[in-house]
Image: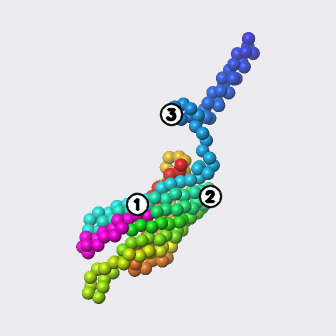
Amino acid sequence: MLRKILVSILLLLSLFSFAQNEETSPSGKPKKPKSPFWEKVFVGGNVGAQFGNVTMVNVSPIVGYRITPKISAGIGITYQYYSIKTYNYETHIYGGRIFGRYQPLSFLFLHAEAEALNWNCPRLDTKNDLITDRLWSPGLLAGGGFTQPIGGGGSSIYIMGLYNFLYNSCSPYGSPFVLRIGANFGL
């Protein structure tokens, strides 16, 4: 009799411990484990807005992949609406970028990217009238930033400072220095 009770208790304990490790969906059915590929994918980017005499709205999503725990790479797209009421000027800026990141410490990363943005570059003609030329503006940006994990699954917020090595008078950035604040979310 004692033997049957011990076997029953051990069987129940083993079932209980198995149930604790198995993830379930809201319907109670076991979830399929994520593939190793999708555990390394992250999405995120940054958004921003400014309103007034100068209006700017920015949406820049990214998709990345953690190649190793310290190295990641990805792609992104950018859309910006930009206007200056004083000059009756507006443009839609769009383009894409590829990037790489190296994270030597848990809170610090180095970032490099190549991008191309299409926009109406403003300039003054000989009569001091504002005219625009629609063109592609290349960018080669590098710098670093700080990151703070949030929640679980590889999610984090970040702030980074970059320098655009291809900055010129027809760059959509107001300066060669670019500041970005954003977030990444693991899948």
Which of marks 1 and 3 precedes in the sequence?
A: 3
Q: Residue furthest top?
A: 1
From the viewer's perspective, tell me whether residue 127 is left or right of residue 8.
Answer: left
Mark 3: amino acid: Pro
Q: Residues within 10 Å of mark 3 (few under 14, many from 20)?
A: few
**Of 107 and 94, the residue lying toward us:** 94
Magenta-drawn segment: 78-92
CA separation in Å, label 3 and label 1: 33 Å
CA separation in Å, label 2 and label 1: 25 Å
Q: Is residue 96 above or below residue 169?
A: above
**Of 31 and 11, the residue lying toward us:** 31
Which of marks 2 and 3 precedes in the sequence?
A: 3
Percent of width and height locating residue 14: 68, 27
Q: Quadrant of residue 112?
A: bottom right
Residue 59's label in the rendered image is 1
Q: Which residue in the structure is indicated by mark 3?
A: 26
The residue positioned 26% from the left and 68% from the top of the image is 53
Q: How many marks?
A: 3
The residue positioned 51% from the left and 73% from the top of the image is 140
Mark 2: amino acid: Ile
Asked if labels 1 and 2 touch by Cβ distance under 8 angstroms, the answer is: no
**Of 174 and 170, the residue lying toward us:** 170
Residue 67's label in the rendered image is 2
